[in-house]
Image (cartoon, helix red, strand yellow):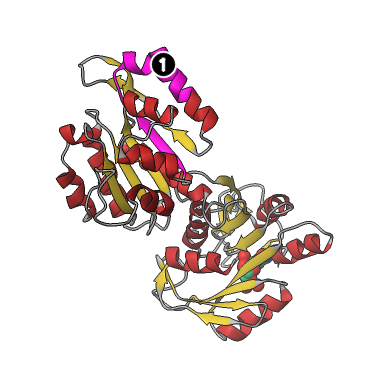
Amino acid sequence: MPLKLFDHKQIILGVTGGIAAYKAAMVCSRLVQAGAMVEVVMTESAQRFITPLTFQALTHRPVRTDLFDLSGDNIPHIALADKADLLLIAPATANTIAKLAHGLADNLLLAIALATPAPILLAPAMETDMWQHPITQANVERLRQLVKQINIIGPATGRLASGGTGAGRMVEPEEIIGLAGTILARHGDLAGWDIVVTAGGTREAIDPVRFISNHSSGKMGYAIATAARDRGAKVTLITTAALPDPFGLKIIKVNSAEQMKEAVLVATRQADVLIMAAAVADFRPQVVAEQKIKKQSHTESLALNLIRNPDILAEVAKQKADGHGPRMTIGFAAETEELLANAQLKLANKKLDLIVANDVTATDAGFGVDTNRVTLLAADGSIEELPLMSKQAVAEAILDKL
Ligand code: C5P
């Protein structure tokens, strides 16, 4: 499945001559599956371990091996270096690390590494003695000191090609892809933004074992939070949902609207954006029974008295009026009738910059499902009706508005 993070990203995969070169094929395949445009550049010795054909089959593109091949772009190393979003060298041998550390450029990969402004990720792989050699260690240190865009992952400790065990294994492809993603995100269009997202339906306690809630699954909020993370934002997710914790987010678990309000007011004091995707209960039981409420044989009904919950967006607007709070607030309007009119009213009353209106009576949109059909109404009067799409795609559309 294409991931937004890698989608259409230009990644140069440099493969150098170590036995771990066979694992570079897995890295390559994963990147292609994630939607990246992968250009593979191999050193001469890499081609002794694995053929260019393997990478060509995986990427559907010619593999570059020659600094002096002028068949395509005019100056291949400059053209490749300029358009890259990331240069990933996996495996990186002691020889390539040494040459990089000293600015040698006697093959295409090294020339690209010297010429590119893109972030570079090295995944060293070699025998333990080579890795621990003071020269290799000094070279790695030199790269860290002098090349600000360099990132080094590993090597891991484990079984080595020689049969021995020690430091020097290339880290596993999944981990390399994970860090590559994090590096790309740092350069995303929301890099430097501080975004607070709420998700899920609040739970309003009736007694120690029961609560009032709604059908919100939290999926929309989680989709927004992870999409914002992948575009480089620092994200705080304030959630009631029992979904798996996504990596790389600050996650604050809450239950009630009151708890969510407290968490939102603290988190948004310095934030750029608040996105209130949570379905906050408008009412809560006035009294929370201390013990589980028992049914009594002679009573046929039970009355619960409900009182109004705070409107979190209204509280945020107040805090904003005092000079603290997010630059932008985005709300959701889940409606069962008069969708646009109700959303317009909420946009104005809650002093929002954008409201995401969705008709929750549709079976393929709204609560619980993976798709949504929404209309975006902005404070400037613009209205954008989006077709049925995945919640991920809706999340991207909302973030595009930022
Ligand atoms: O007024 P309504 O509840 O329909 O508005 C929905 C929007 O307001 C959502 O963004 C929701 O998260 C937010 N909300 C809130 N505090 C409440 C109720 C809703 O911030 N008490």
Is 349 on the left-hand or right-hand side of 38?
right
Nearest to the observer: residue 365 or residue 242: 365
Which quadrant would residue 399 be assigned to in this image? bottom right
Against 370, residue 151 (above or below) is above
* Residue 129 among those drawn in magenta: yes
Q: Residue at x 28, y 15 (%)?
A: 165
Which quadrant would residue 90 be assigned to in this image? top left
Q: Quadrant of the C terminus?
A: bottom right
Local SS, label 1: helix
**Residue 257: % across, % down:** 66, 58
Number of numbered discs: 1
Q: Quadrant of the N terminus?
A: bottom left
Q: Is residue 303 visible?
A: no
**Residue 200: % across, % down:** 54, 59
**Residue 81: % across, % down:** 40, 48
Against 343, residue 119 (above or below) is above
- Residue denoted by label 1: 135
Which quadrant would residue 278 be assigned to in this image? bottom right
Q: Is residue 195 visible?
A: yes
Nearest to the observer: residue 378 or residue 68: 68
Q: Residue at x 15, y 40 (%)?
A: 51
Residue range in magenta is 119-141
Is 125 on the left-hand or right-hand side of 390?
left
Against 82, residue 331 (above or below) is below
* Residue 30 among those drawn in magenta: no
Where does ligand 1 appear, by image quarter?
Answer: bottom right
Is 354 on the left-hand or right-hand side of 111?
right
Q: Residue at x 17, y 32 (%)?
A: 49
